[in-house]
Image (cartoon, helix red, strand yellow):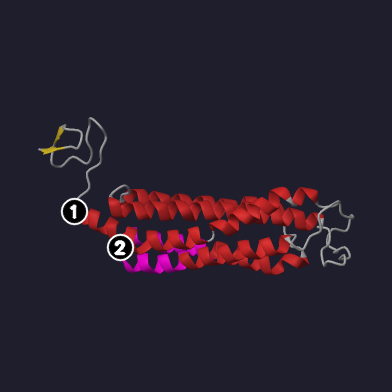
Amino acid sequence: MRKCECGNQVANNARSCPKCGHRFTSGPVKFLAWFIGIIIGMGILGAIFAGNSSQNAITSNTSSVAPAFAPTPNNSKQHPTQNSSGQRPITESERTYFGAAGSYVQTANAQGTNVAQTMAGASDGSSTLGDIRAALLSAKRVESAGYQGDYKDRINGDVPSSCVGLSKNIDETHRLFQSAMNELLEYWKDQNTAHIESGNATLKRSIVLMNATINQTTAKMREFKPHN
């Protein structure tokens, strides 16, 4: 018998305390969880939080500036003439595109943050290997749904000429994110920690590109002329 932190006596082979629900983790599993948490969590958290200020900026610009843009002509793919300051009204095509891009980036950023926080929790025992695997599976599913539903379905193939570069970055961010999730999940098939290191590197590349895309979108938003 062993004593749970709540004071209840529990069988040595029990996985959790029947009284308080506290989960018991074996030594080898604790070590692997710690390894995963250190290798992945802190590095990814740093990459994500480094771009938080940029994401806040694009969210603020989208909510406060976009509604003030002047109405556009029916041919939304043609750019109106720029004024003397170099700014121009936003087209409906661009408005739709930036809204879709912003929704996807927010989804991807939230999923990356959740994965990193769950992995970082492995170092202090607040996350188990099962928690990490569940977070990876959820992030893979939710990010994919956000890319398809919030972004691809919403723009319906209409990428304004001014957003071609941004579109390529978003597609690559999604590809890297999914590749990272798949590689990290391979660990649970053969327990080879090389999957952890490789997946971590790919996920950080996805996050760095995501942050660059946020900055690129913010810069694009400044090109448009507010409606007076």
Q: Which mark is in front, 2 or 1?
A: 1
Q: Earlier in the sequence, mark 2 or mark 1?
A: 1
- For disc 2, the marked residue is 190
Q: Which mark identifies residue 225?
A: none
Magenta-drawn stretch, dominant element (helix, strand or loop): helix
Query: What x and y, as percent, mark residue 17?
Result: 22, 35
Above or below, comparing residue 143 to residue 174 in the picture: above
Q: For the residues marked 2 and 1, what is the alpha-carbon distance in whole angstroms?
A: 19 Å
Whether residue 9 is visible to the viewer of this picture, yes or no, is yes
Whether residue 148 is visible to the viewer of this picture, yes or no, is no
Left/right placement of residue 106 relative to residue 137 reads right
Question: Can residue 193 be found in the magenta stretch?
Answer: yes
Question: Can residue 132 be found in the magenta stretch?
Answer: no
Which stretch did the figure color magenta? 176-203
Q: Residue at x 52, y 50 (%)?
A: 142
Q: Which residue type carries mark 1?
A: Gly
In this orientation, which residue lies closer to the viewer: 158 or 112?
A: 112
- For disc 1, the marked residue is 27
Left/right placement of residue 126 relative to residue 28 reads right
